Amino acid sequence: MGVGGKIAILLNGPPRAGKDTAVAALESAFGPHAETLKFTRPIKDLTHSRFGLDCSHDAFEDLKDVPLPEFGGMTPREAYIDTSAKLKAERGDDAVCRLFVEAIDACNASLILNPDAGNDMEAEAVAEALGADRVLVIRIHRDGHDFSQCCRTWISSPSLHIVDVTNREGERRVFESEVVALSRAFVETVRARDAASCNETVMRMAS
């Protein structure tokens, strides 16, 4: 299946807003049809190599905001941001986006889940590869959480399909259910459109 035949759900929100919770719910809902890909995976691999670390990309997930000697006193999050900035300076602002689109192309899943979309450039790169009508952006809001300590920001491109959800304290299941329902509706709409287009093509060829 080529890049253009896939659907992507991009989760956008500040640190600790609930993106990982949302993607876990989506993984459970869509099963083997979906695969989670992060913009940050190649950045993490590059950062670990840069600091001489032989480990998996997710080795520091539970310590993202803890200053560590392995990263010269930086937190893993700070080290990843620094590597991203250096990569963009060397290869252009869209370097991380290009790496991510290549990962989508290599993926066999029909549904791509991304829990770390952080700006319009990233989201638009995915939309350009798949088609804007095949990309859903879910912006996650949570009281007390913002982008003040993060290089990411809200996705707001008018060319993208964007919906907003709120992750309220003590209402995790409600939040998960809303994210899954929105995603299911979007995927079903795209697949129905694909089926209609396919049927129209068949009928046209048969006439």
Image: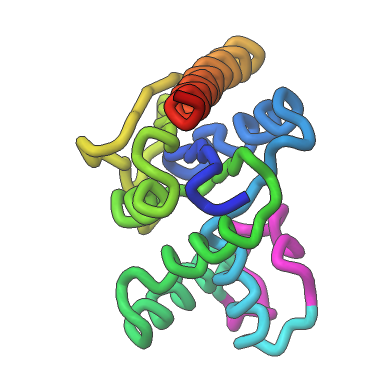
- On the image, the x and y values in percent for residue 85 come to 38, 75
The colour style of the image is rainbow
Residue drawn at x 53%, y 38% is: 7
Task: Kindly give the residue lying farthest to the front in the view shown.
Answer: 207
Q: Is residue 81 above or below residue 32?
A: below
Viewer-nearest residue: 61 or 99: 99
Residue drawn at x 51%, y 62% is: 100
Residue drawn at x 64%, y 32% is: 21
Residue drawn at x 40%, y 82% is: 86
| Displayed quadrant of residue 65 | bottom right
Locate residue 155 relative to residue 15 in the image: left or right. Answer: left
Locate residue 97 relative to residue 100 in the image: left or right. Answer: left
Q: Is residue 52 magenta?
A: no
| Displayed quadrant of residue 125 | bottom left
Viewer-nearest residue: 71 or 200: 200
Q: Is residue 72 magenta?
A: yes
- On the image, the x and y values in percent for residue 198 come to 51, 28
**Residue 149 visible in the snapshot:** no
- Magenta segment: 55-73
In the picture, the quarter occupied by the C terminus is top left
Give the prevailing secondary structure in the magenta stretch: loop
Locate residue 167 relative to residue 128 in the image: left or right. Answer: right
